Image (spheres, rainbow, N blue to C red):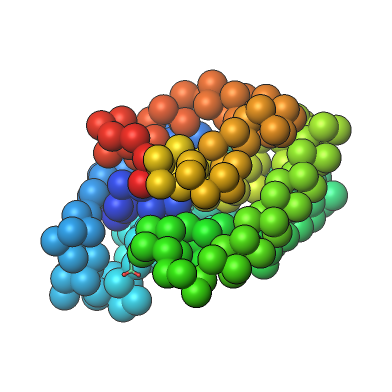
Amino acid sequence: MEYDFYWISGSPNAWRAMLALEYKDVSYNSHRLDASKQEHKSSAFLTLNPQGKVPVLKHGDTVVCESIAIMAYLESVHPKSPLFGVTAAETGLVWQRIFEFVNGLRDLIDDGVVRPLSQGLKPDSKDALTAATIAVHESLARLEAVLGVTDYLAGDRVSAADFTVVPNLLMLMRLGIRPDVLALELRFNDVRSTYPAIAKWLARLEALPAFDAAYPPHWLLSSGG
Ligand SMILES: N[C@@H](CCC(=O)N[C@@H](CS)C(=O)NCC(=O)O)C(=O)O
């Protein structure tokens, strides 16, 4: 049965699902949607995901939306190269790390920093941005402590927890080098030097063949933003 995968370049949610596809060496028909043309709101796409969001994975009659659900689905069909642990303790820790991120750092990054900066910072939202920035750095310090002990977020093996966190973090770091953002001194440009264990973890992930295969193509053409 064939896989069809629908994604938008630079979408962190699509990126993590694509990392799982590539890591598990699953072949798929790639459907890159153009957000500027609202292709993710077309009637054909809305029949797959009425929310009009990527990623979507279609496998025969099965349609899976939600990036983390897609990773779990792939794990179930392709247990080789496990991403959700092998022992019960490993599985528990992978899910723990995923939920810690989803219930904490993700919204701080997306809602607290990326969205306000992408939409143009309004003078009255500067205090909220400062508060979110402090909270993001506190979370990064906690990740740094975890990665000081193990090579990956849920132990010494790459897992769905790493693929969950890395796209949003790299998006934040990419935004951090934009000249107008640099001027705000949020210090997302120097995450690698501030957090050496995170830097080594990023290097480990970047060395995976899956990383290059899933890297947002439009990021190769431009920097920042
Ligand atoms: N919780 C969903 C979030 C999906 C999501 O928000 N996708 C974004 C791209 S990162 C999207 O398609 N946005 C388009 C829109 O909302 O119009 C997941 O993990 O897959």
Residue sitting farthest toward the bottom: 50
Q: Nearer the viewer, residue 87 or 197?
A: 197
Does residue 1 appear to the left or right of 158 in the view shown?
left
**Which residue is pictured at 62% across the width and 61% down the height?**
130
Does residue 83 appear to the left or right of 1 in the view shown?
right
Q: Nearer the viewer, residue 163 or 37?
A: 37
Residue sitting farthest toward the top: 207
Compared with 129, 179 (above or below) is: above
**Which residue is pictured at 41% across the width and 27% down the height?**
212
Q: Give coordinates of residue 35: x percent, y percent.
A: 22, 59
Does residue 151 appear to the left or right of 58 in the view shown?
right
Q: Give coordinates of residue 12: x percent, y percent.
A: 45, 51
Q: Nearer the viewer, residue 129 or 164?
A: 129
**Which residue is pictured at 79% across the width and 47% down the height?**
142
Q: Give coordinates of residue 33: x percent, y percent.
A: 22, 54
Q: Give coordinates of residue 49: x percent, y percent.
A: 32, 72
Residue 66 seen in the figure:
no
Q: Name the image quarter holding residue 177.
A: top left
Q: Name the image quarter holding residue 38.
A: bottom left
